[in-house]
Amino acid sequence: MLSRVRSAVAHLVSSGGAPSQRPKSPDPPNTTSALSAAAETPKSPRTRPGSQVGAPPKTAETRASFSRPTFLQLSPGGLRRADDHAGRAVQSPPDTGRRLPWSTGYAEVINAGKSRHNEDQACCEVVYVESRRVTEASRESTVNQGLCFYYWGLFDGHAGGGAAEMASRLLHRHIREQLKDLVEILQDPLPPPLCVPSTPGTPGFSDPSHLVSPQSCWSPQKEITHESLVVGAIENAFQLMDEQMAPERRGHQVEGGCCALVVVYLLGKMYVANAGDSRAIIIRNGDIIPMSREFTPETERQRLQLLGFLKPELLGSEFTHLEFPRRVQPKELGQRMLYRDQNMTGWAYKKIELEDLRFPLVCGEGKKARVMATIGVTRGLGDHNLKVCSSTLPIKPFLSCFPEVRVYDLTQYEHCPDDVLVLGTDGLWDVTNDCEVAATVDRVLSAYEPNDPSRYTALAQALVLGARGIPRDRGWRLPNNKLGSGDDISVFVIPLGGPGSYS
Amino acid sequence: MLSRVRSAVAHLVSSGGAPSQRPKSPDPPNTTSALSAAAETPKSPRTRPGSQVGAPPKTAETRASFSRPTFLQLSPGGLRRADDHAGRAVQSPPDTGRRLPWSTGYAEVINAGKSRHNEDQACCEVVYVESRRVTEASRESTVNQGLCFYYWGLFDGHAGGGAAEMASRLLHRHIREQLKDLVEILQDPLPPPLCVPSTPGTPGFSDPSHLVSPQSCWSPQKEITHESLVVGAIENAFQLMDEQMAPERRGHQVEGGCCALVVVYLLGKMYVANAGDSRAIIIRNGDIIPMSREFTPETERQRLQLLGFLKPELLGSEFTHLEFPRRVQPKELGQRMLYRDQNMTGWAYKKIELEDLRFPLVCGEGKKARVMATIGVTRGLGDHNLKVCSSTLPIKPFLSCFPEVRVYDLTQYEHCPDDVLVLGTDGLWDVTNDCEVAATVDRVLSAYEPNDPSRYTALAQALVLGARGIPRDRGWRLPNNKLGSGDDISVFVIPLGGPGSYS
């Protein structure tokens, strides 16, 4: 995430908290899933799901290093090439290894020098969710007690790589923890019970026969869908992931923050959750279906201003919640300038008063827009320590860790092999748009046989290469001679025709 | 607005504040416009535009009566028929009188008995905006100094008719006051100046030659459009209208509140501003273009919950900002119930604690949704005195007077006589939908010659009749035998092919 945080440089070295260059897993890297994933978490019931997701061990040795997604299966030499700002070689999982689930395509490239390492991270997993009801006795039976979900995540770090790396390792586990309470409910065709009698982990939880006075629960009250429970589980998982990064939890403190764009495929539906400025689109039969929107100081201006208005103490004496088209000059006191309050989408003139000379909470346009003159994204994970430059004013209160979740029902449409969900960090979208991506999808996929599983990796590589450009005239340039993206670029291409063979 | 406020009955009689059954104007009722409107406001410069819009005189005699829009030209007998809940006769401007601007069609009908009078109000005006720069000397010259806008407004009152009537008389004047500062700027093809040196009313205001250091104003700063200035003017006019209804301003206090849906046509563009649950749609070549959205406890849940979360004192000890699918019972303490917090769109289970037994700030679904168990709309004007039933807790802090403004550029499309903008209060939309309205538009307009100006009134009448139904089986029923709308119903039909002949 290029220049996403002004003070990024100060934090570059300490990607802290999460280990890197992990010893190679004895499992194939693409299968840290099902039983192996389940085995990583303790099995006793807990009251606080957030505390159930183990943090990776932290050692002095790992703090200074960096890592790339395990599924890239990089050798030490490969890792060095992936870390080379001059060559900016595009990285993808090896053709020879086990493919990612659904034959997902992936490609990434490091930035052109704006940060020491690639601060994007990625994760692709098959995750098995065991019900919290499962006892030791029932575990030994052959009855299937759980659910399985497919998971893809892109994490775009800023002010250090620690938050992105931690999220790439743990967020899907938080989602799993949240879903554990819902295993039976999601598999029951009846609407979810509004009230359940006991705490999770005790026998009978969510067993219909134990429902509290079903009459009063079910009568003319609001009916909650299964889908909205999965959305709620993902939302709460994001919040718990964010809390786990908080400085109070010294055991696994991380520097910096990250945007998070994740996809969960569960029971026929894709849940696309976005907190930040990455983007997901579906290309279906050539049509573009947006599956996310970006959260930036511009798109979230009114939320930010409202918070500053209701809680002026968060602005210190340095900022005003009003927006002005430019910084007001002291000599302009008493004159009239255009402004926008938190309730307005239009502009009006106001007489400049003393406190209008403060810096606007939200300023700038496009990629230069900033909250408190510091950060250019307004949702994501981490950033607990982020302060206004040359000040002790914390920025975190203005940031939200909650994603917007959009749902796409895969069963409502017969997908062909050319229908794909494309996820990209802002390194991709800064220099290209939905239509250009759709054109690349068409061009690349039509060059491959429909049943060639390598076509999605080729497409991801083409998208990354098209955004990076080639070195020319002292910079990375696109065919039209405009500057390519100097940011980290990461792309997933998920074929939508695939789930049948994996579910 | 049917059952919009639980405590409505208590306020029914006092529609106070605004006069009714006004003495017939010496001007034709449809032309309270241009010079006559301008002449009604004082001419000296003022510092507070809100205080510049005169309130109608209040007398003891007028408080107990009621009024209908002047353009209906109702005789005393006609007024009685319009007020008859049993007959529910559809009212439209007379064929013999002067037509409304643009041959606008209008029809209304009173409710089926839920309130003593029709609490909807309407306004249709041509408004002349004189620049604040104009001096006595220049006023006498023949040079055109001003701007003209066309204006349509629907106001759906609740808990009394006073707010709707006051808004129908004054809101367009507040808009005019806001636009007075912008007359030269809007007519100048250059982008608006970011900063202007002097207060309005002094010579040289907004004269380009008087701009403050144009260099610093114009350089890489945000460019503000003319359109966004008009949007800002309308937004601030809504706020000032709302303030004028506040109880502190005893001179013209009003009971109750109202939704407001207004359209301003200015310099080729339609500005559709909505605060409440009325709705505007454009039917163009058979296609439906939504021009507003409704603001209800359901659509604004997250804004309301966030406010309750940030300012818990607004909830007293009676409400919780959390949403539950139904009221939590004391016996359920310690059990787990579905809930939704202000950051969530999905649902999750939480352990019920003592304060969850409070009533949810937002509850219910559809037309039964309520804020603080009281009011079913979350934006509008007035309601300054509204309290929670059997409590002193004020509801106003949760209500917003700010409209959402959507802009439609009439010059971007060649409109035919069948292209219309339909405005309706919720009495219309409760029993019909966009598609059914589009079908009625097609059916009715095709039965008239394209150049017959009465076709839009016929269409408005057909829409109102179609929503009211006919008396049968102890109720008003639609052809499909479902219940018709028992609410006040008001509809404007504005032909989009019209402006050429009026601008």
Image (cartoon, coloured by chain):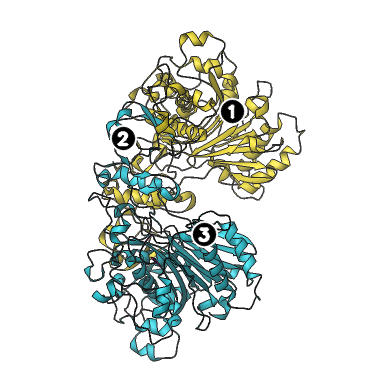
Chain colours: A yellow, B cyan
Q: Callout 1: few (<14), some (14-19), or many (20+) C-alpha neighbours within 10 Å?
A: some
Asked if the residue under mark 3 is in contact with the one under mark 1, i.e. CB atoms within 8 Å, the reply is no
How many discs mark residues in the rendered view?
3
Q: Which residue is mark 3?
A: B472
- Left/right placement of residue B209 relative to residue B502 reads left
Q: Tell me the number on the disc at residue B356.
A: 2
Q: Which residues are magenta?
A: B113-120
Of residue B267 and residue A114, the one placed in the foreground of this image is B267
Which SS class for mark 1?
helix
Residue A13 at x, y percent in the picture: 42, 30
Gap in Å between the C-alphas at discs 1 and 3? 81 Å
Is residue B114 magenta-colored? yes
Res A81 label: 1
Q: Which residue does the image show at 72% across and 36% down from the upper left?
A: A416
The answer to whether the residues at label 1 and label 2 have Cβ atoms under 8 Å apart is no
Provide residue B122's location: percent of width, then percent of height.
43, 70
Is residue A8 placed above or below B94 in the rendered structure?
above
Q: Chain of mark 1?
A: A
Q: Image check: A491 left or right of A382?
A: right
Q: Residue at x 56, y 42 (%)?
A: A291
- Examine the rendering and report whether any part of residue A261 can be seen: no
Q: Amino acid at mark 2?
A: Asp
Residue A49 sits in quarter: top left
Q: Is residue A306 left or right of residue A76?
A: left
Q: Earlier in the sequence, mark 2 or mark 3?
A: 2
Residue A368 or residue A478, whichever sits in front: A368
Callout 3, which amino acid? Arg
Q: Nearer the viewer, mark 2 or mark 3?
A: 3
> In terms of image quadrants, where is residue A424?
top right
Three-letter residue code for mark 1: Arg
Vertical order, A184 against B438 (above or below):
above
SS for dot 3: loop
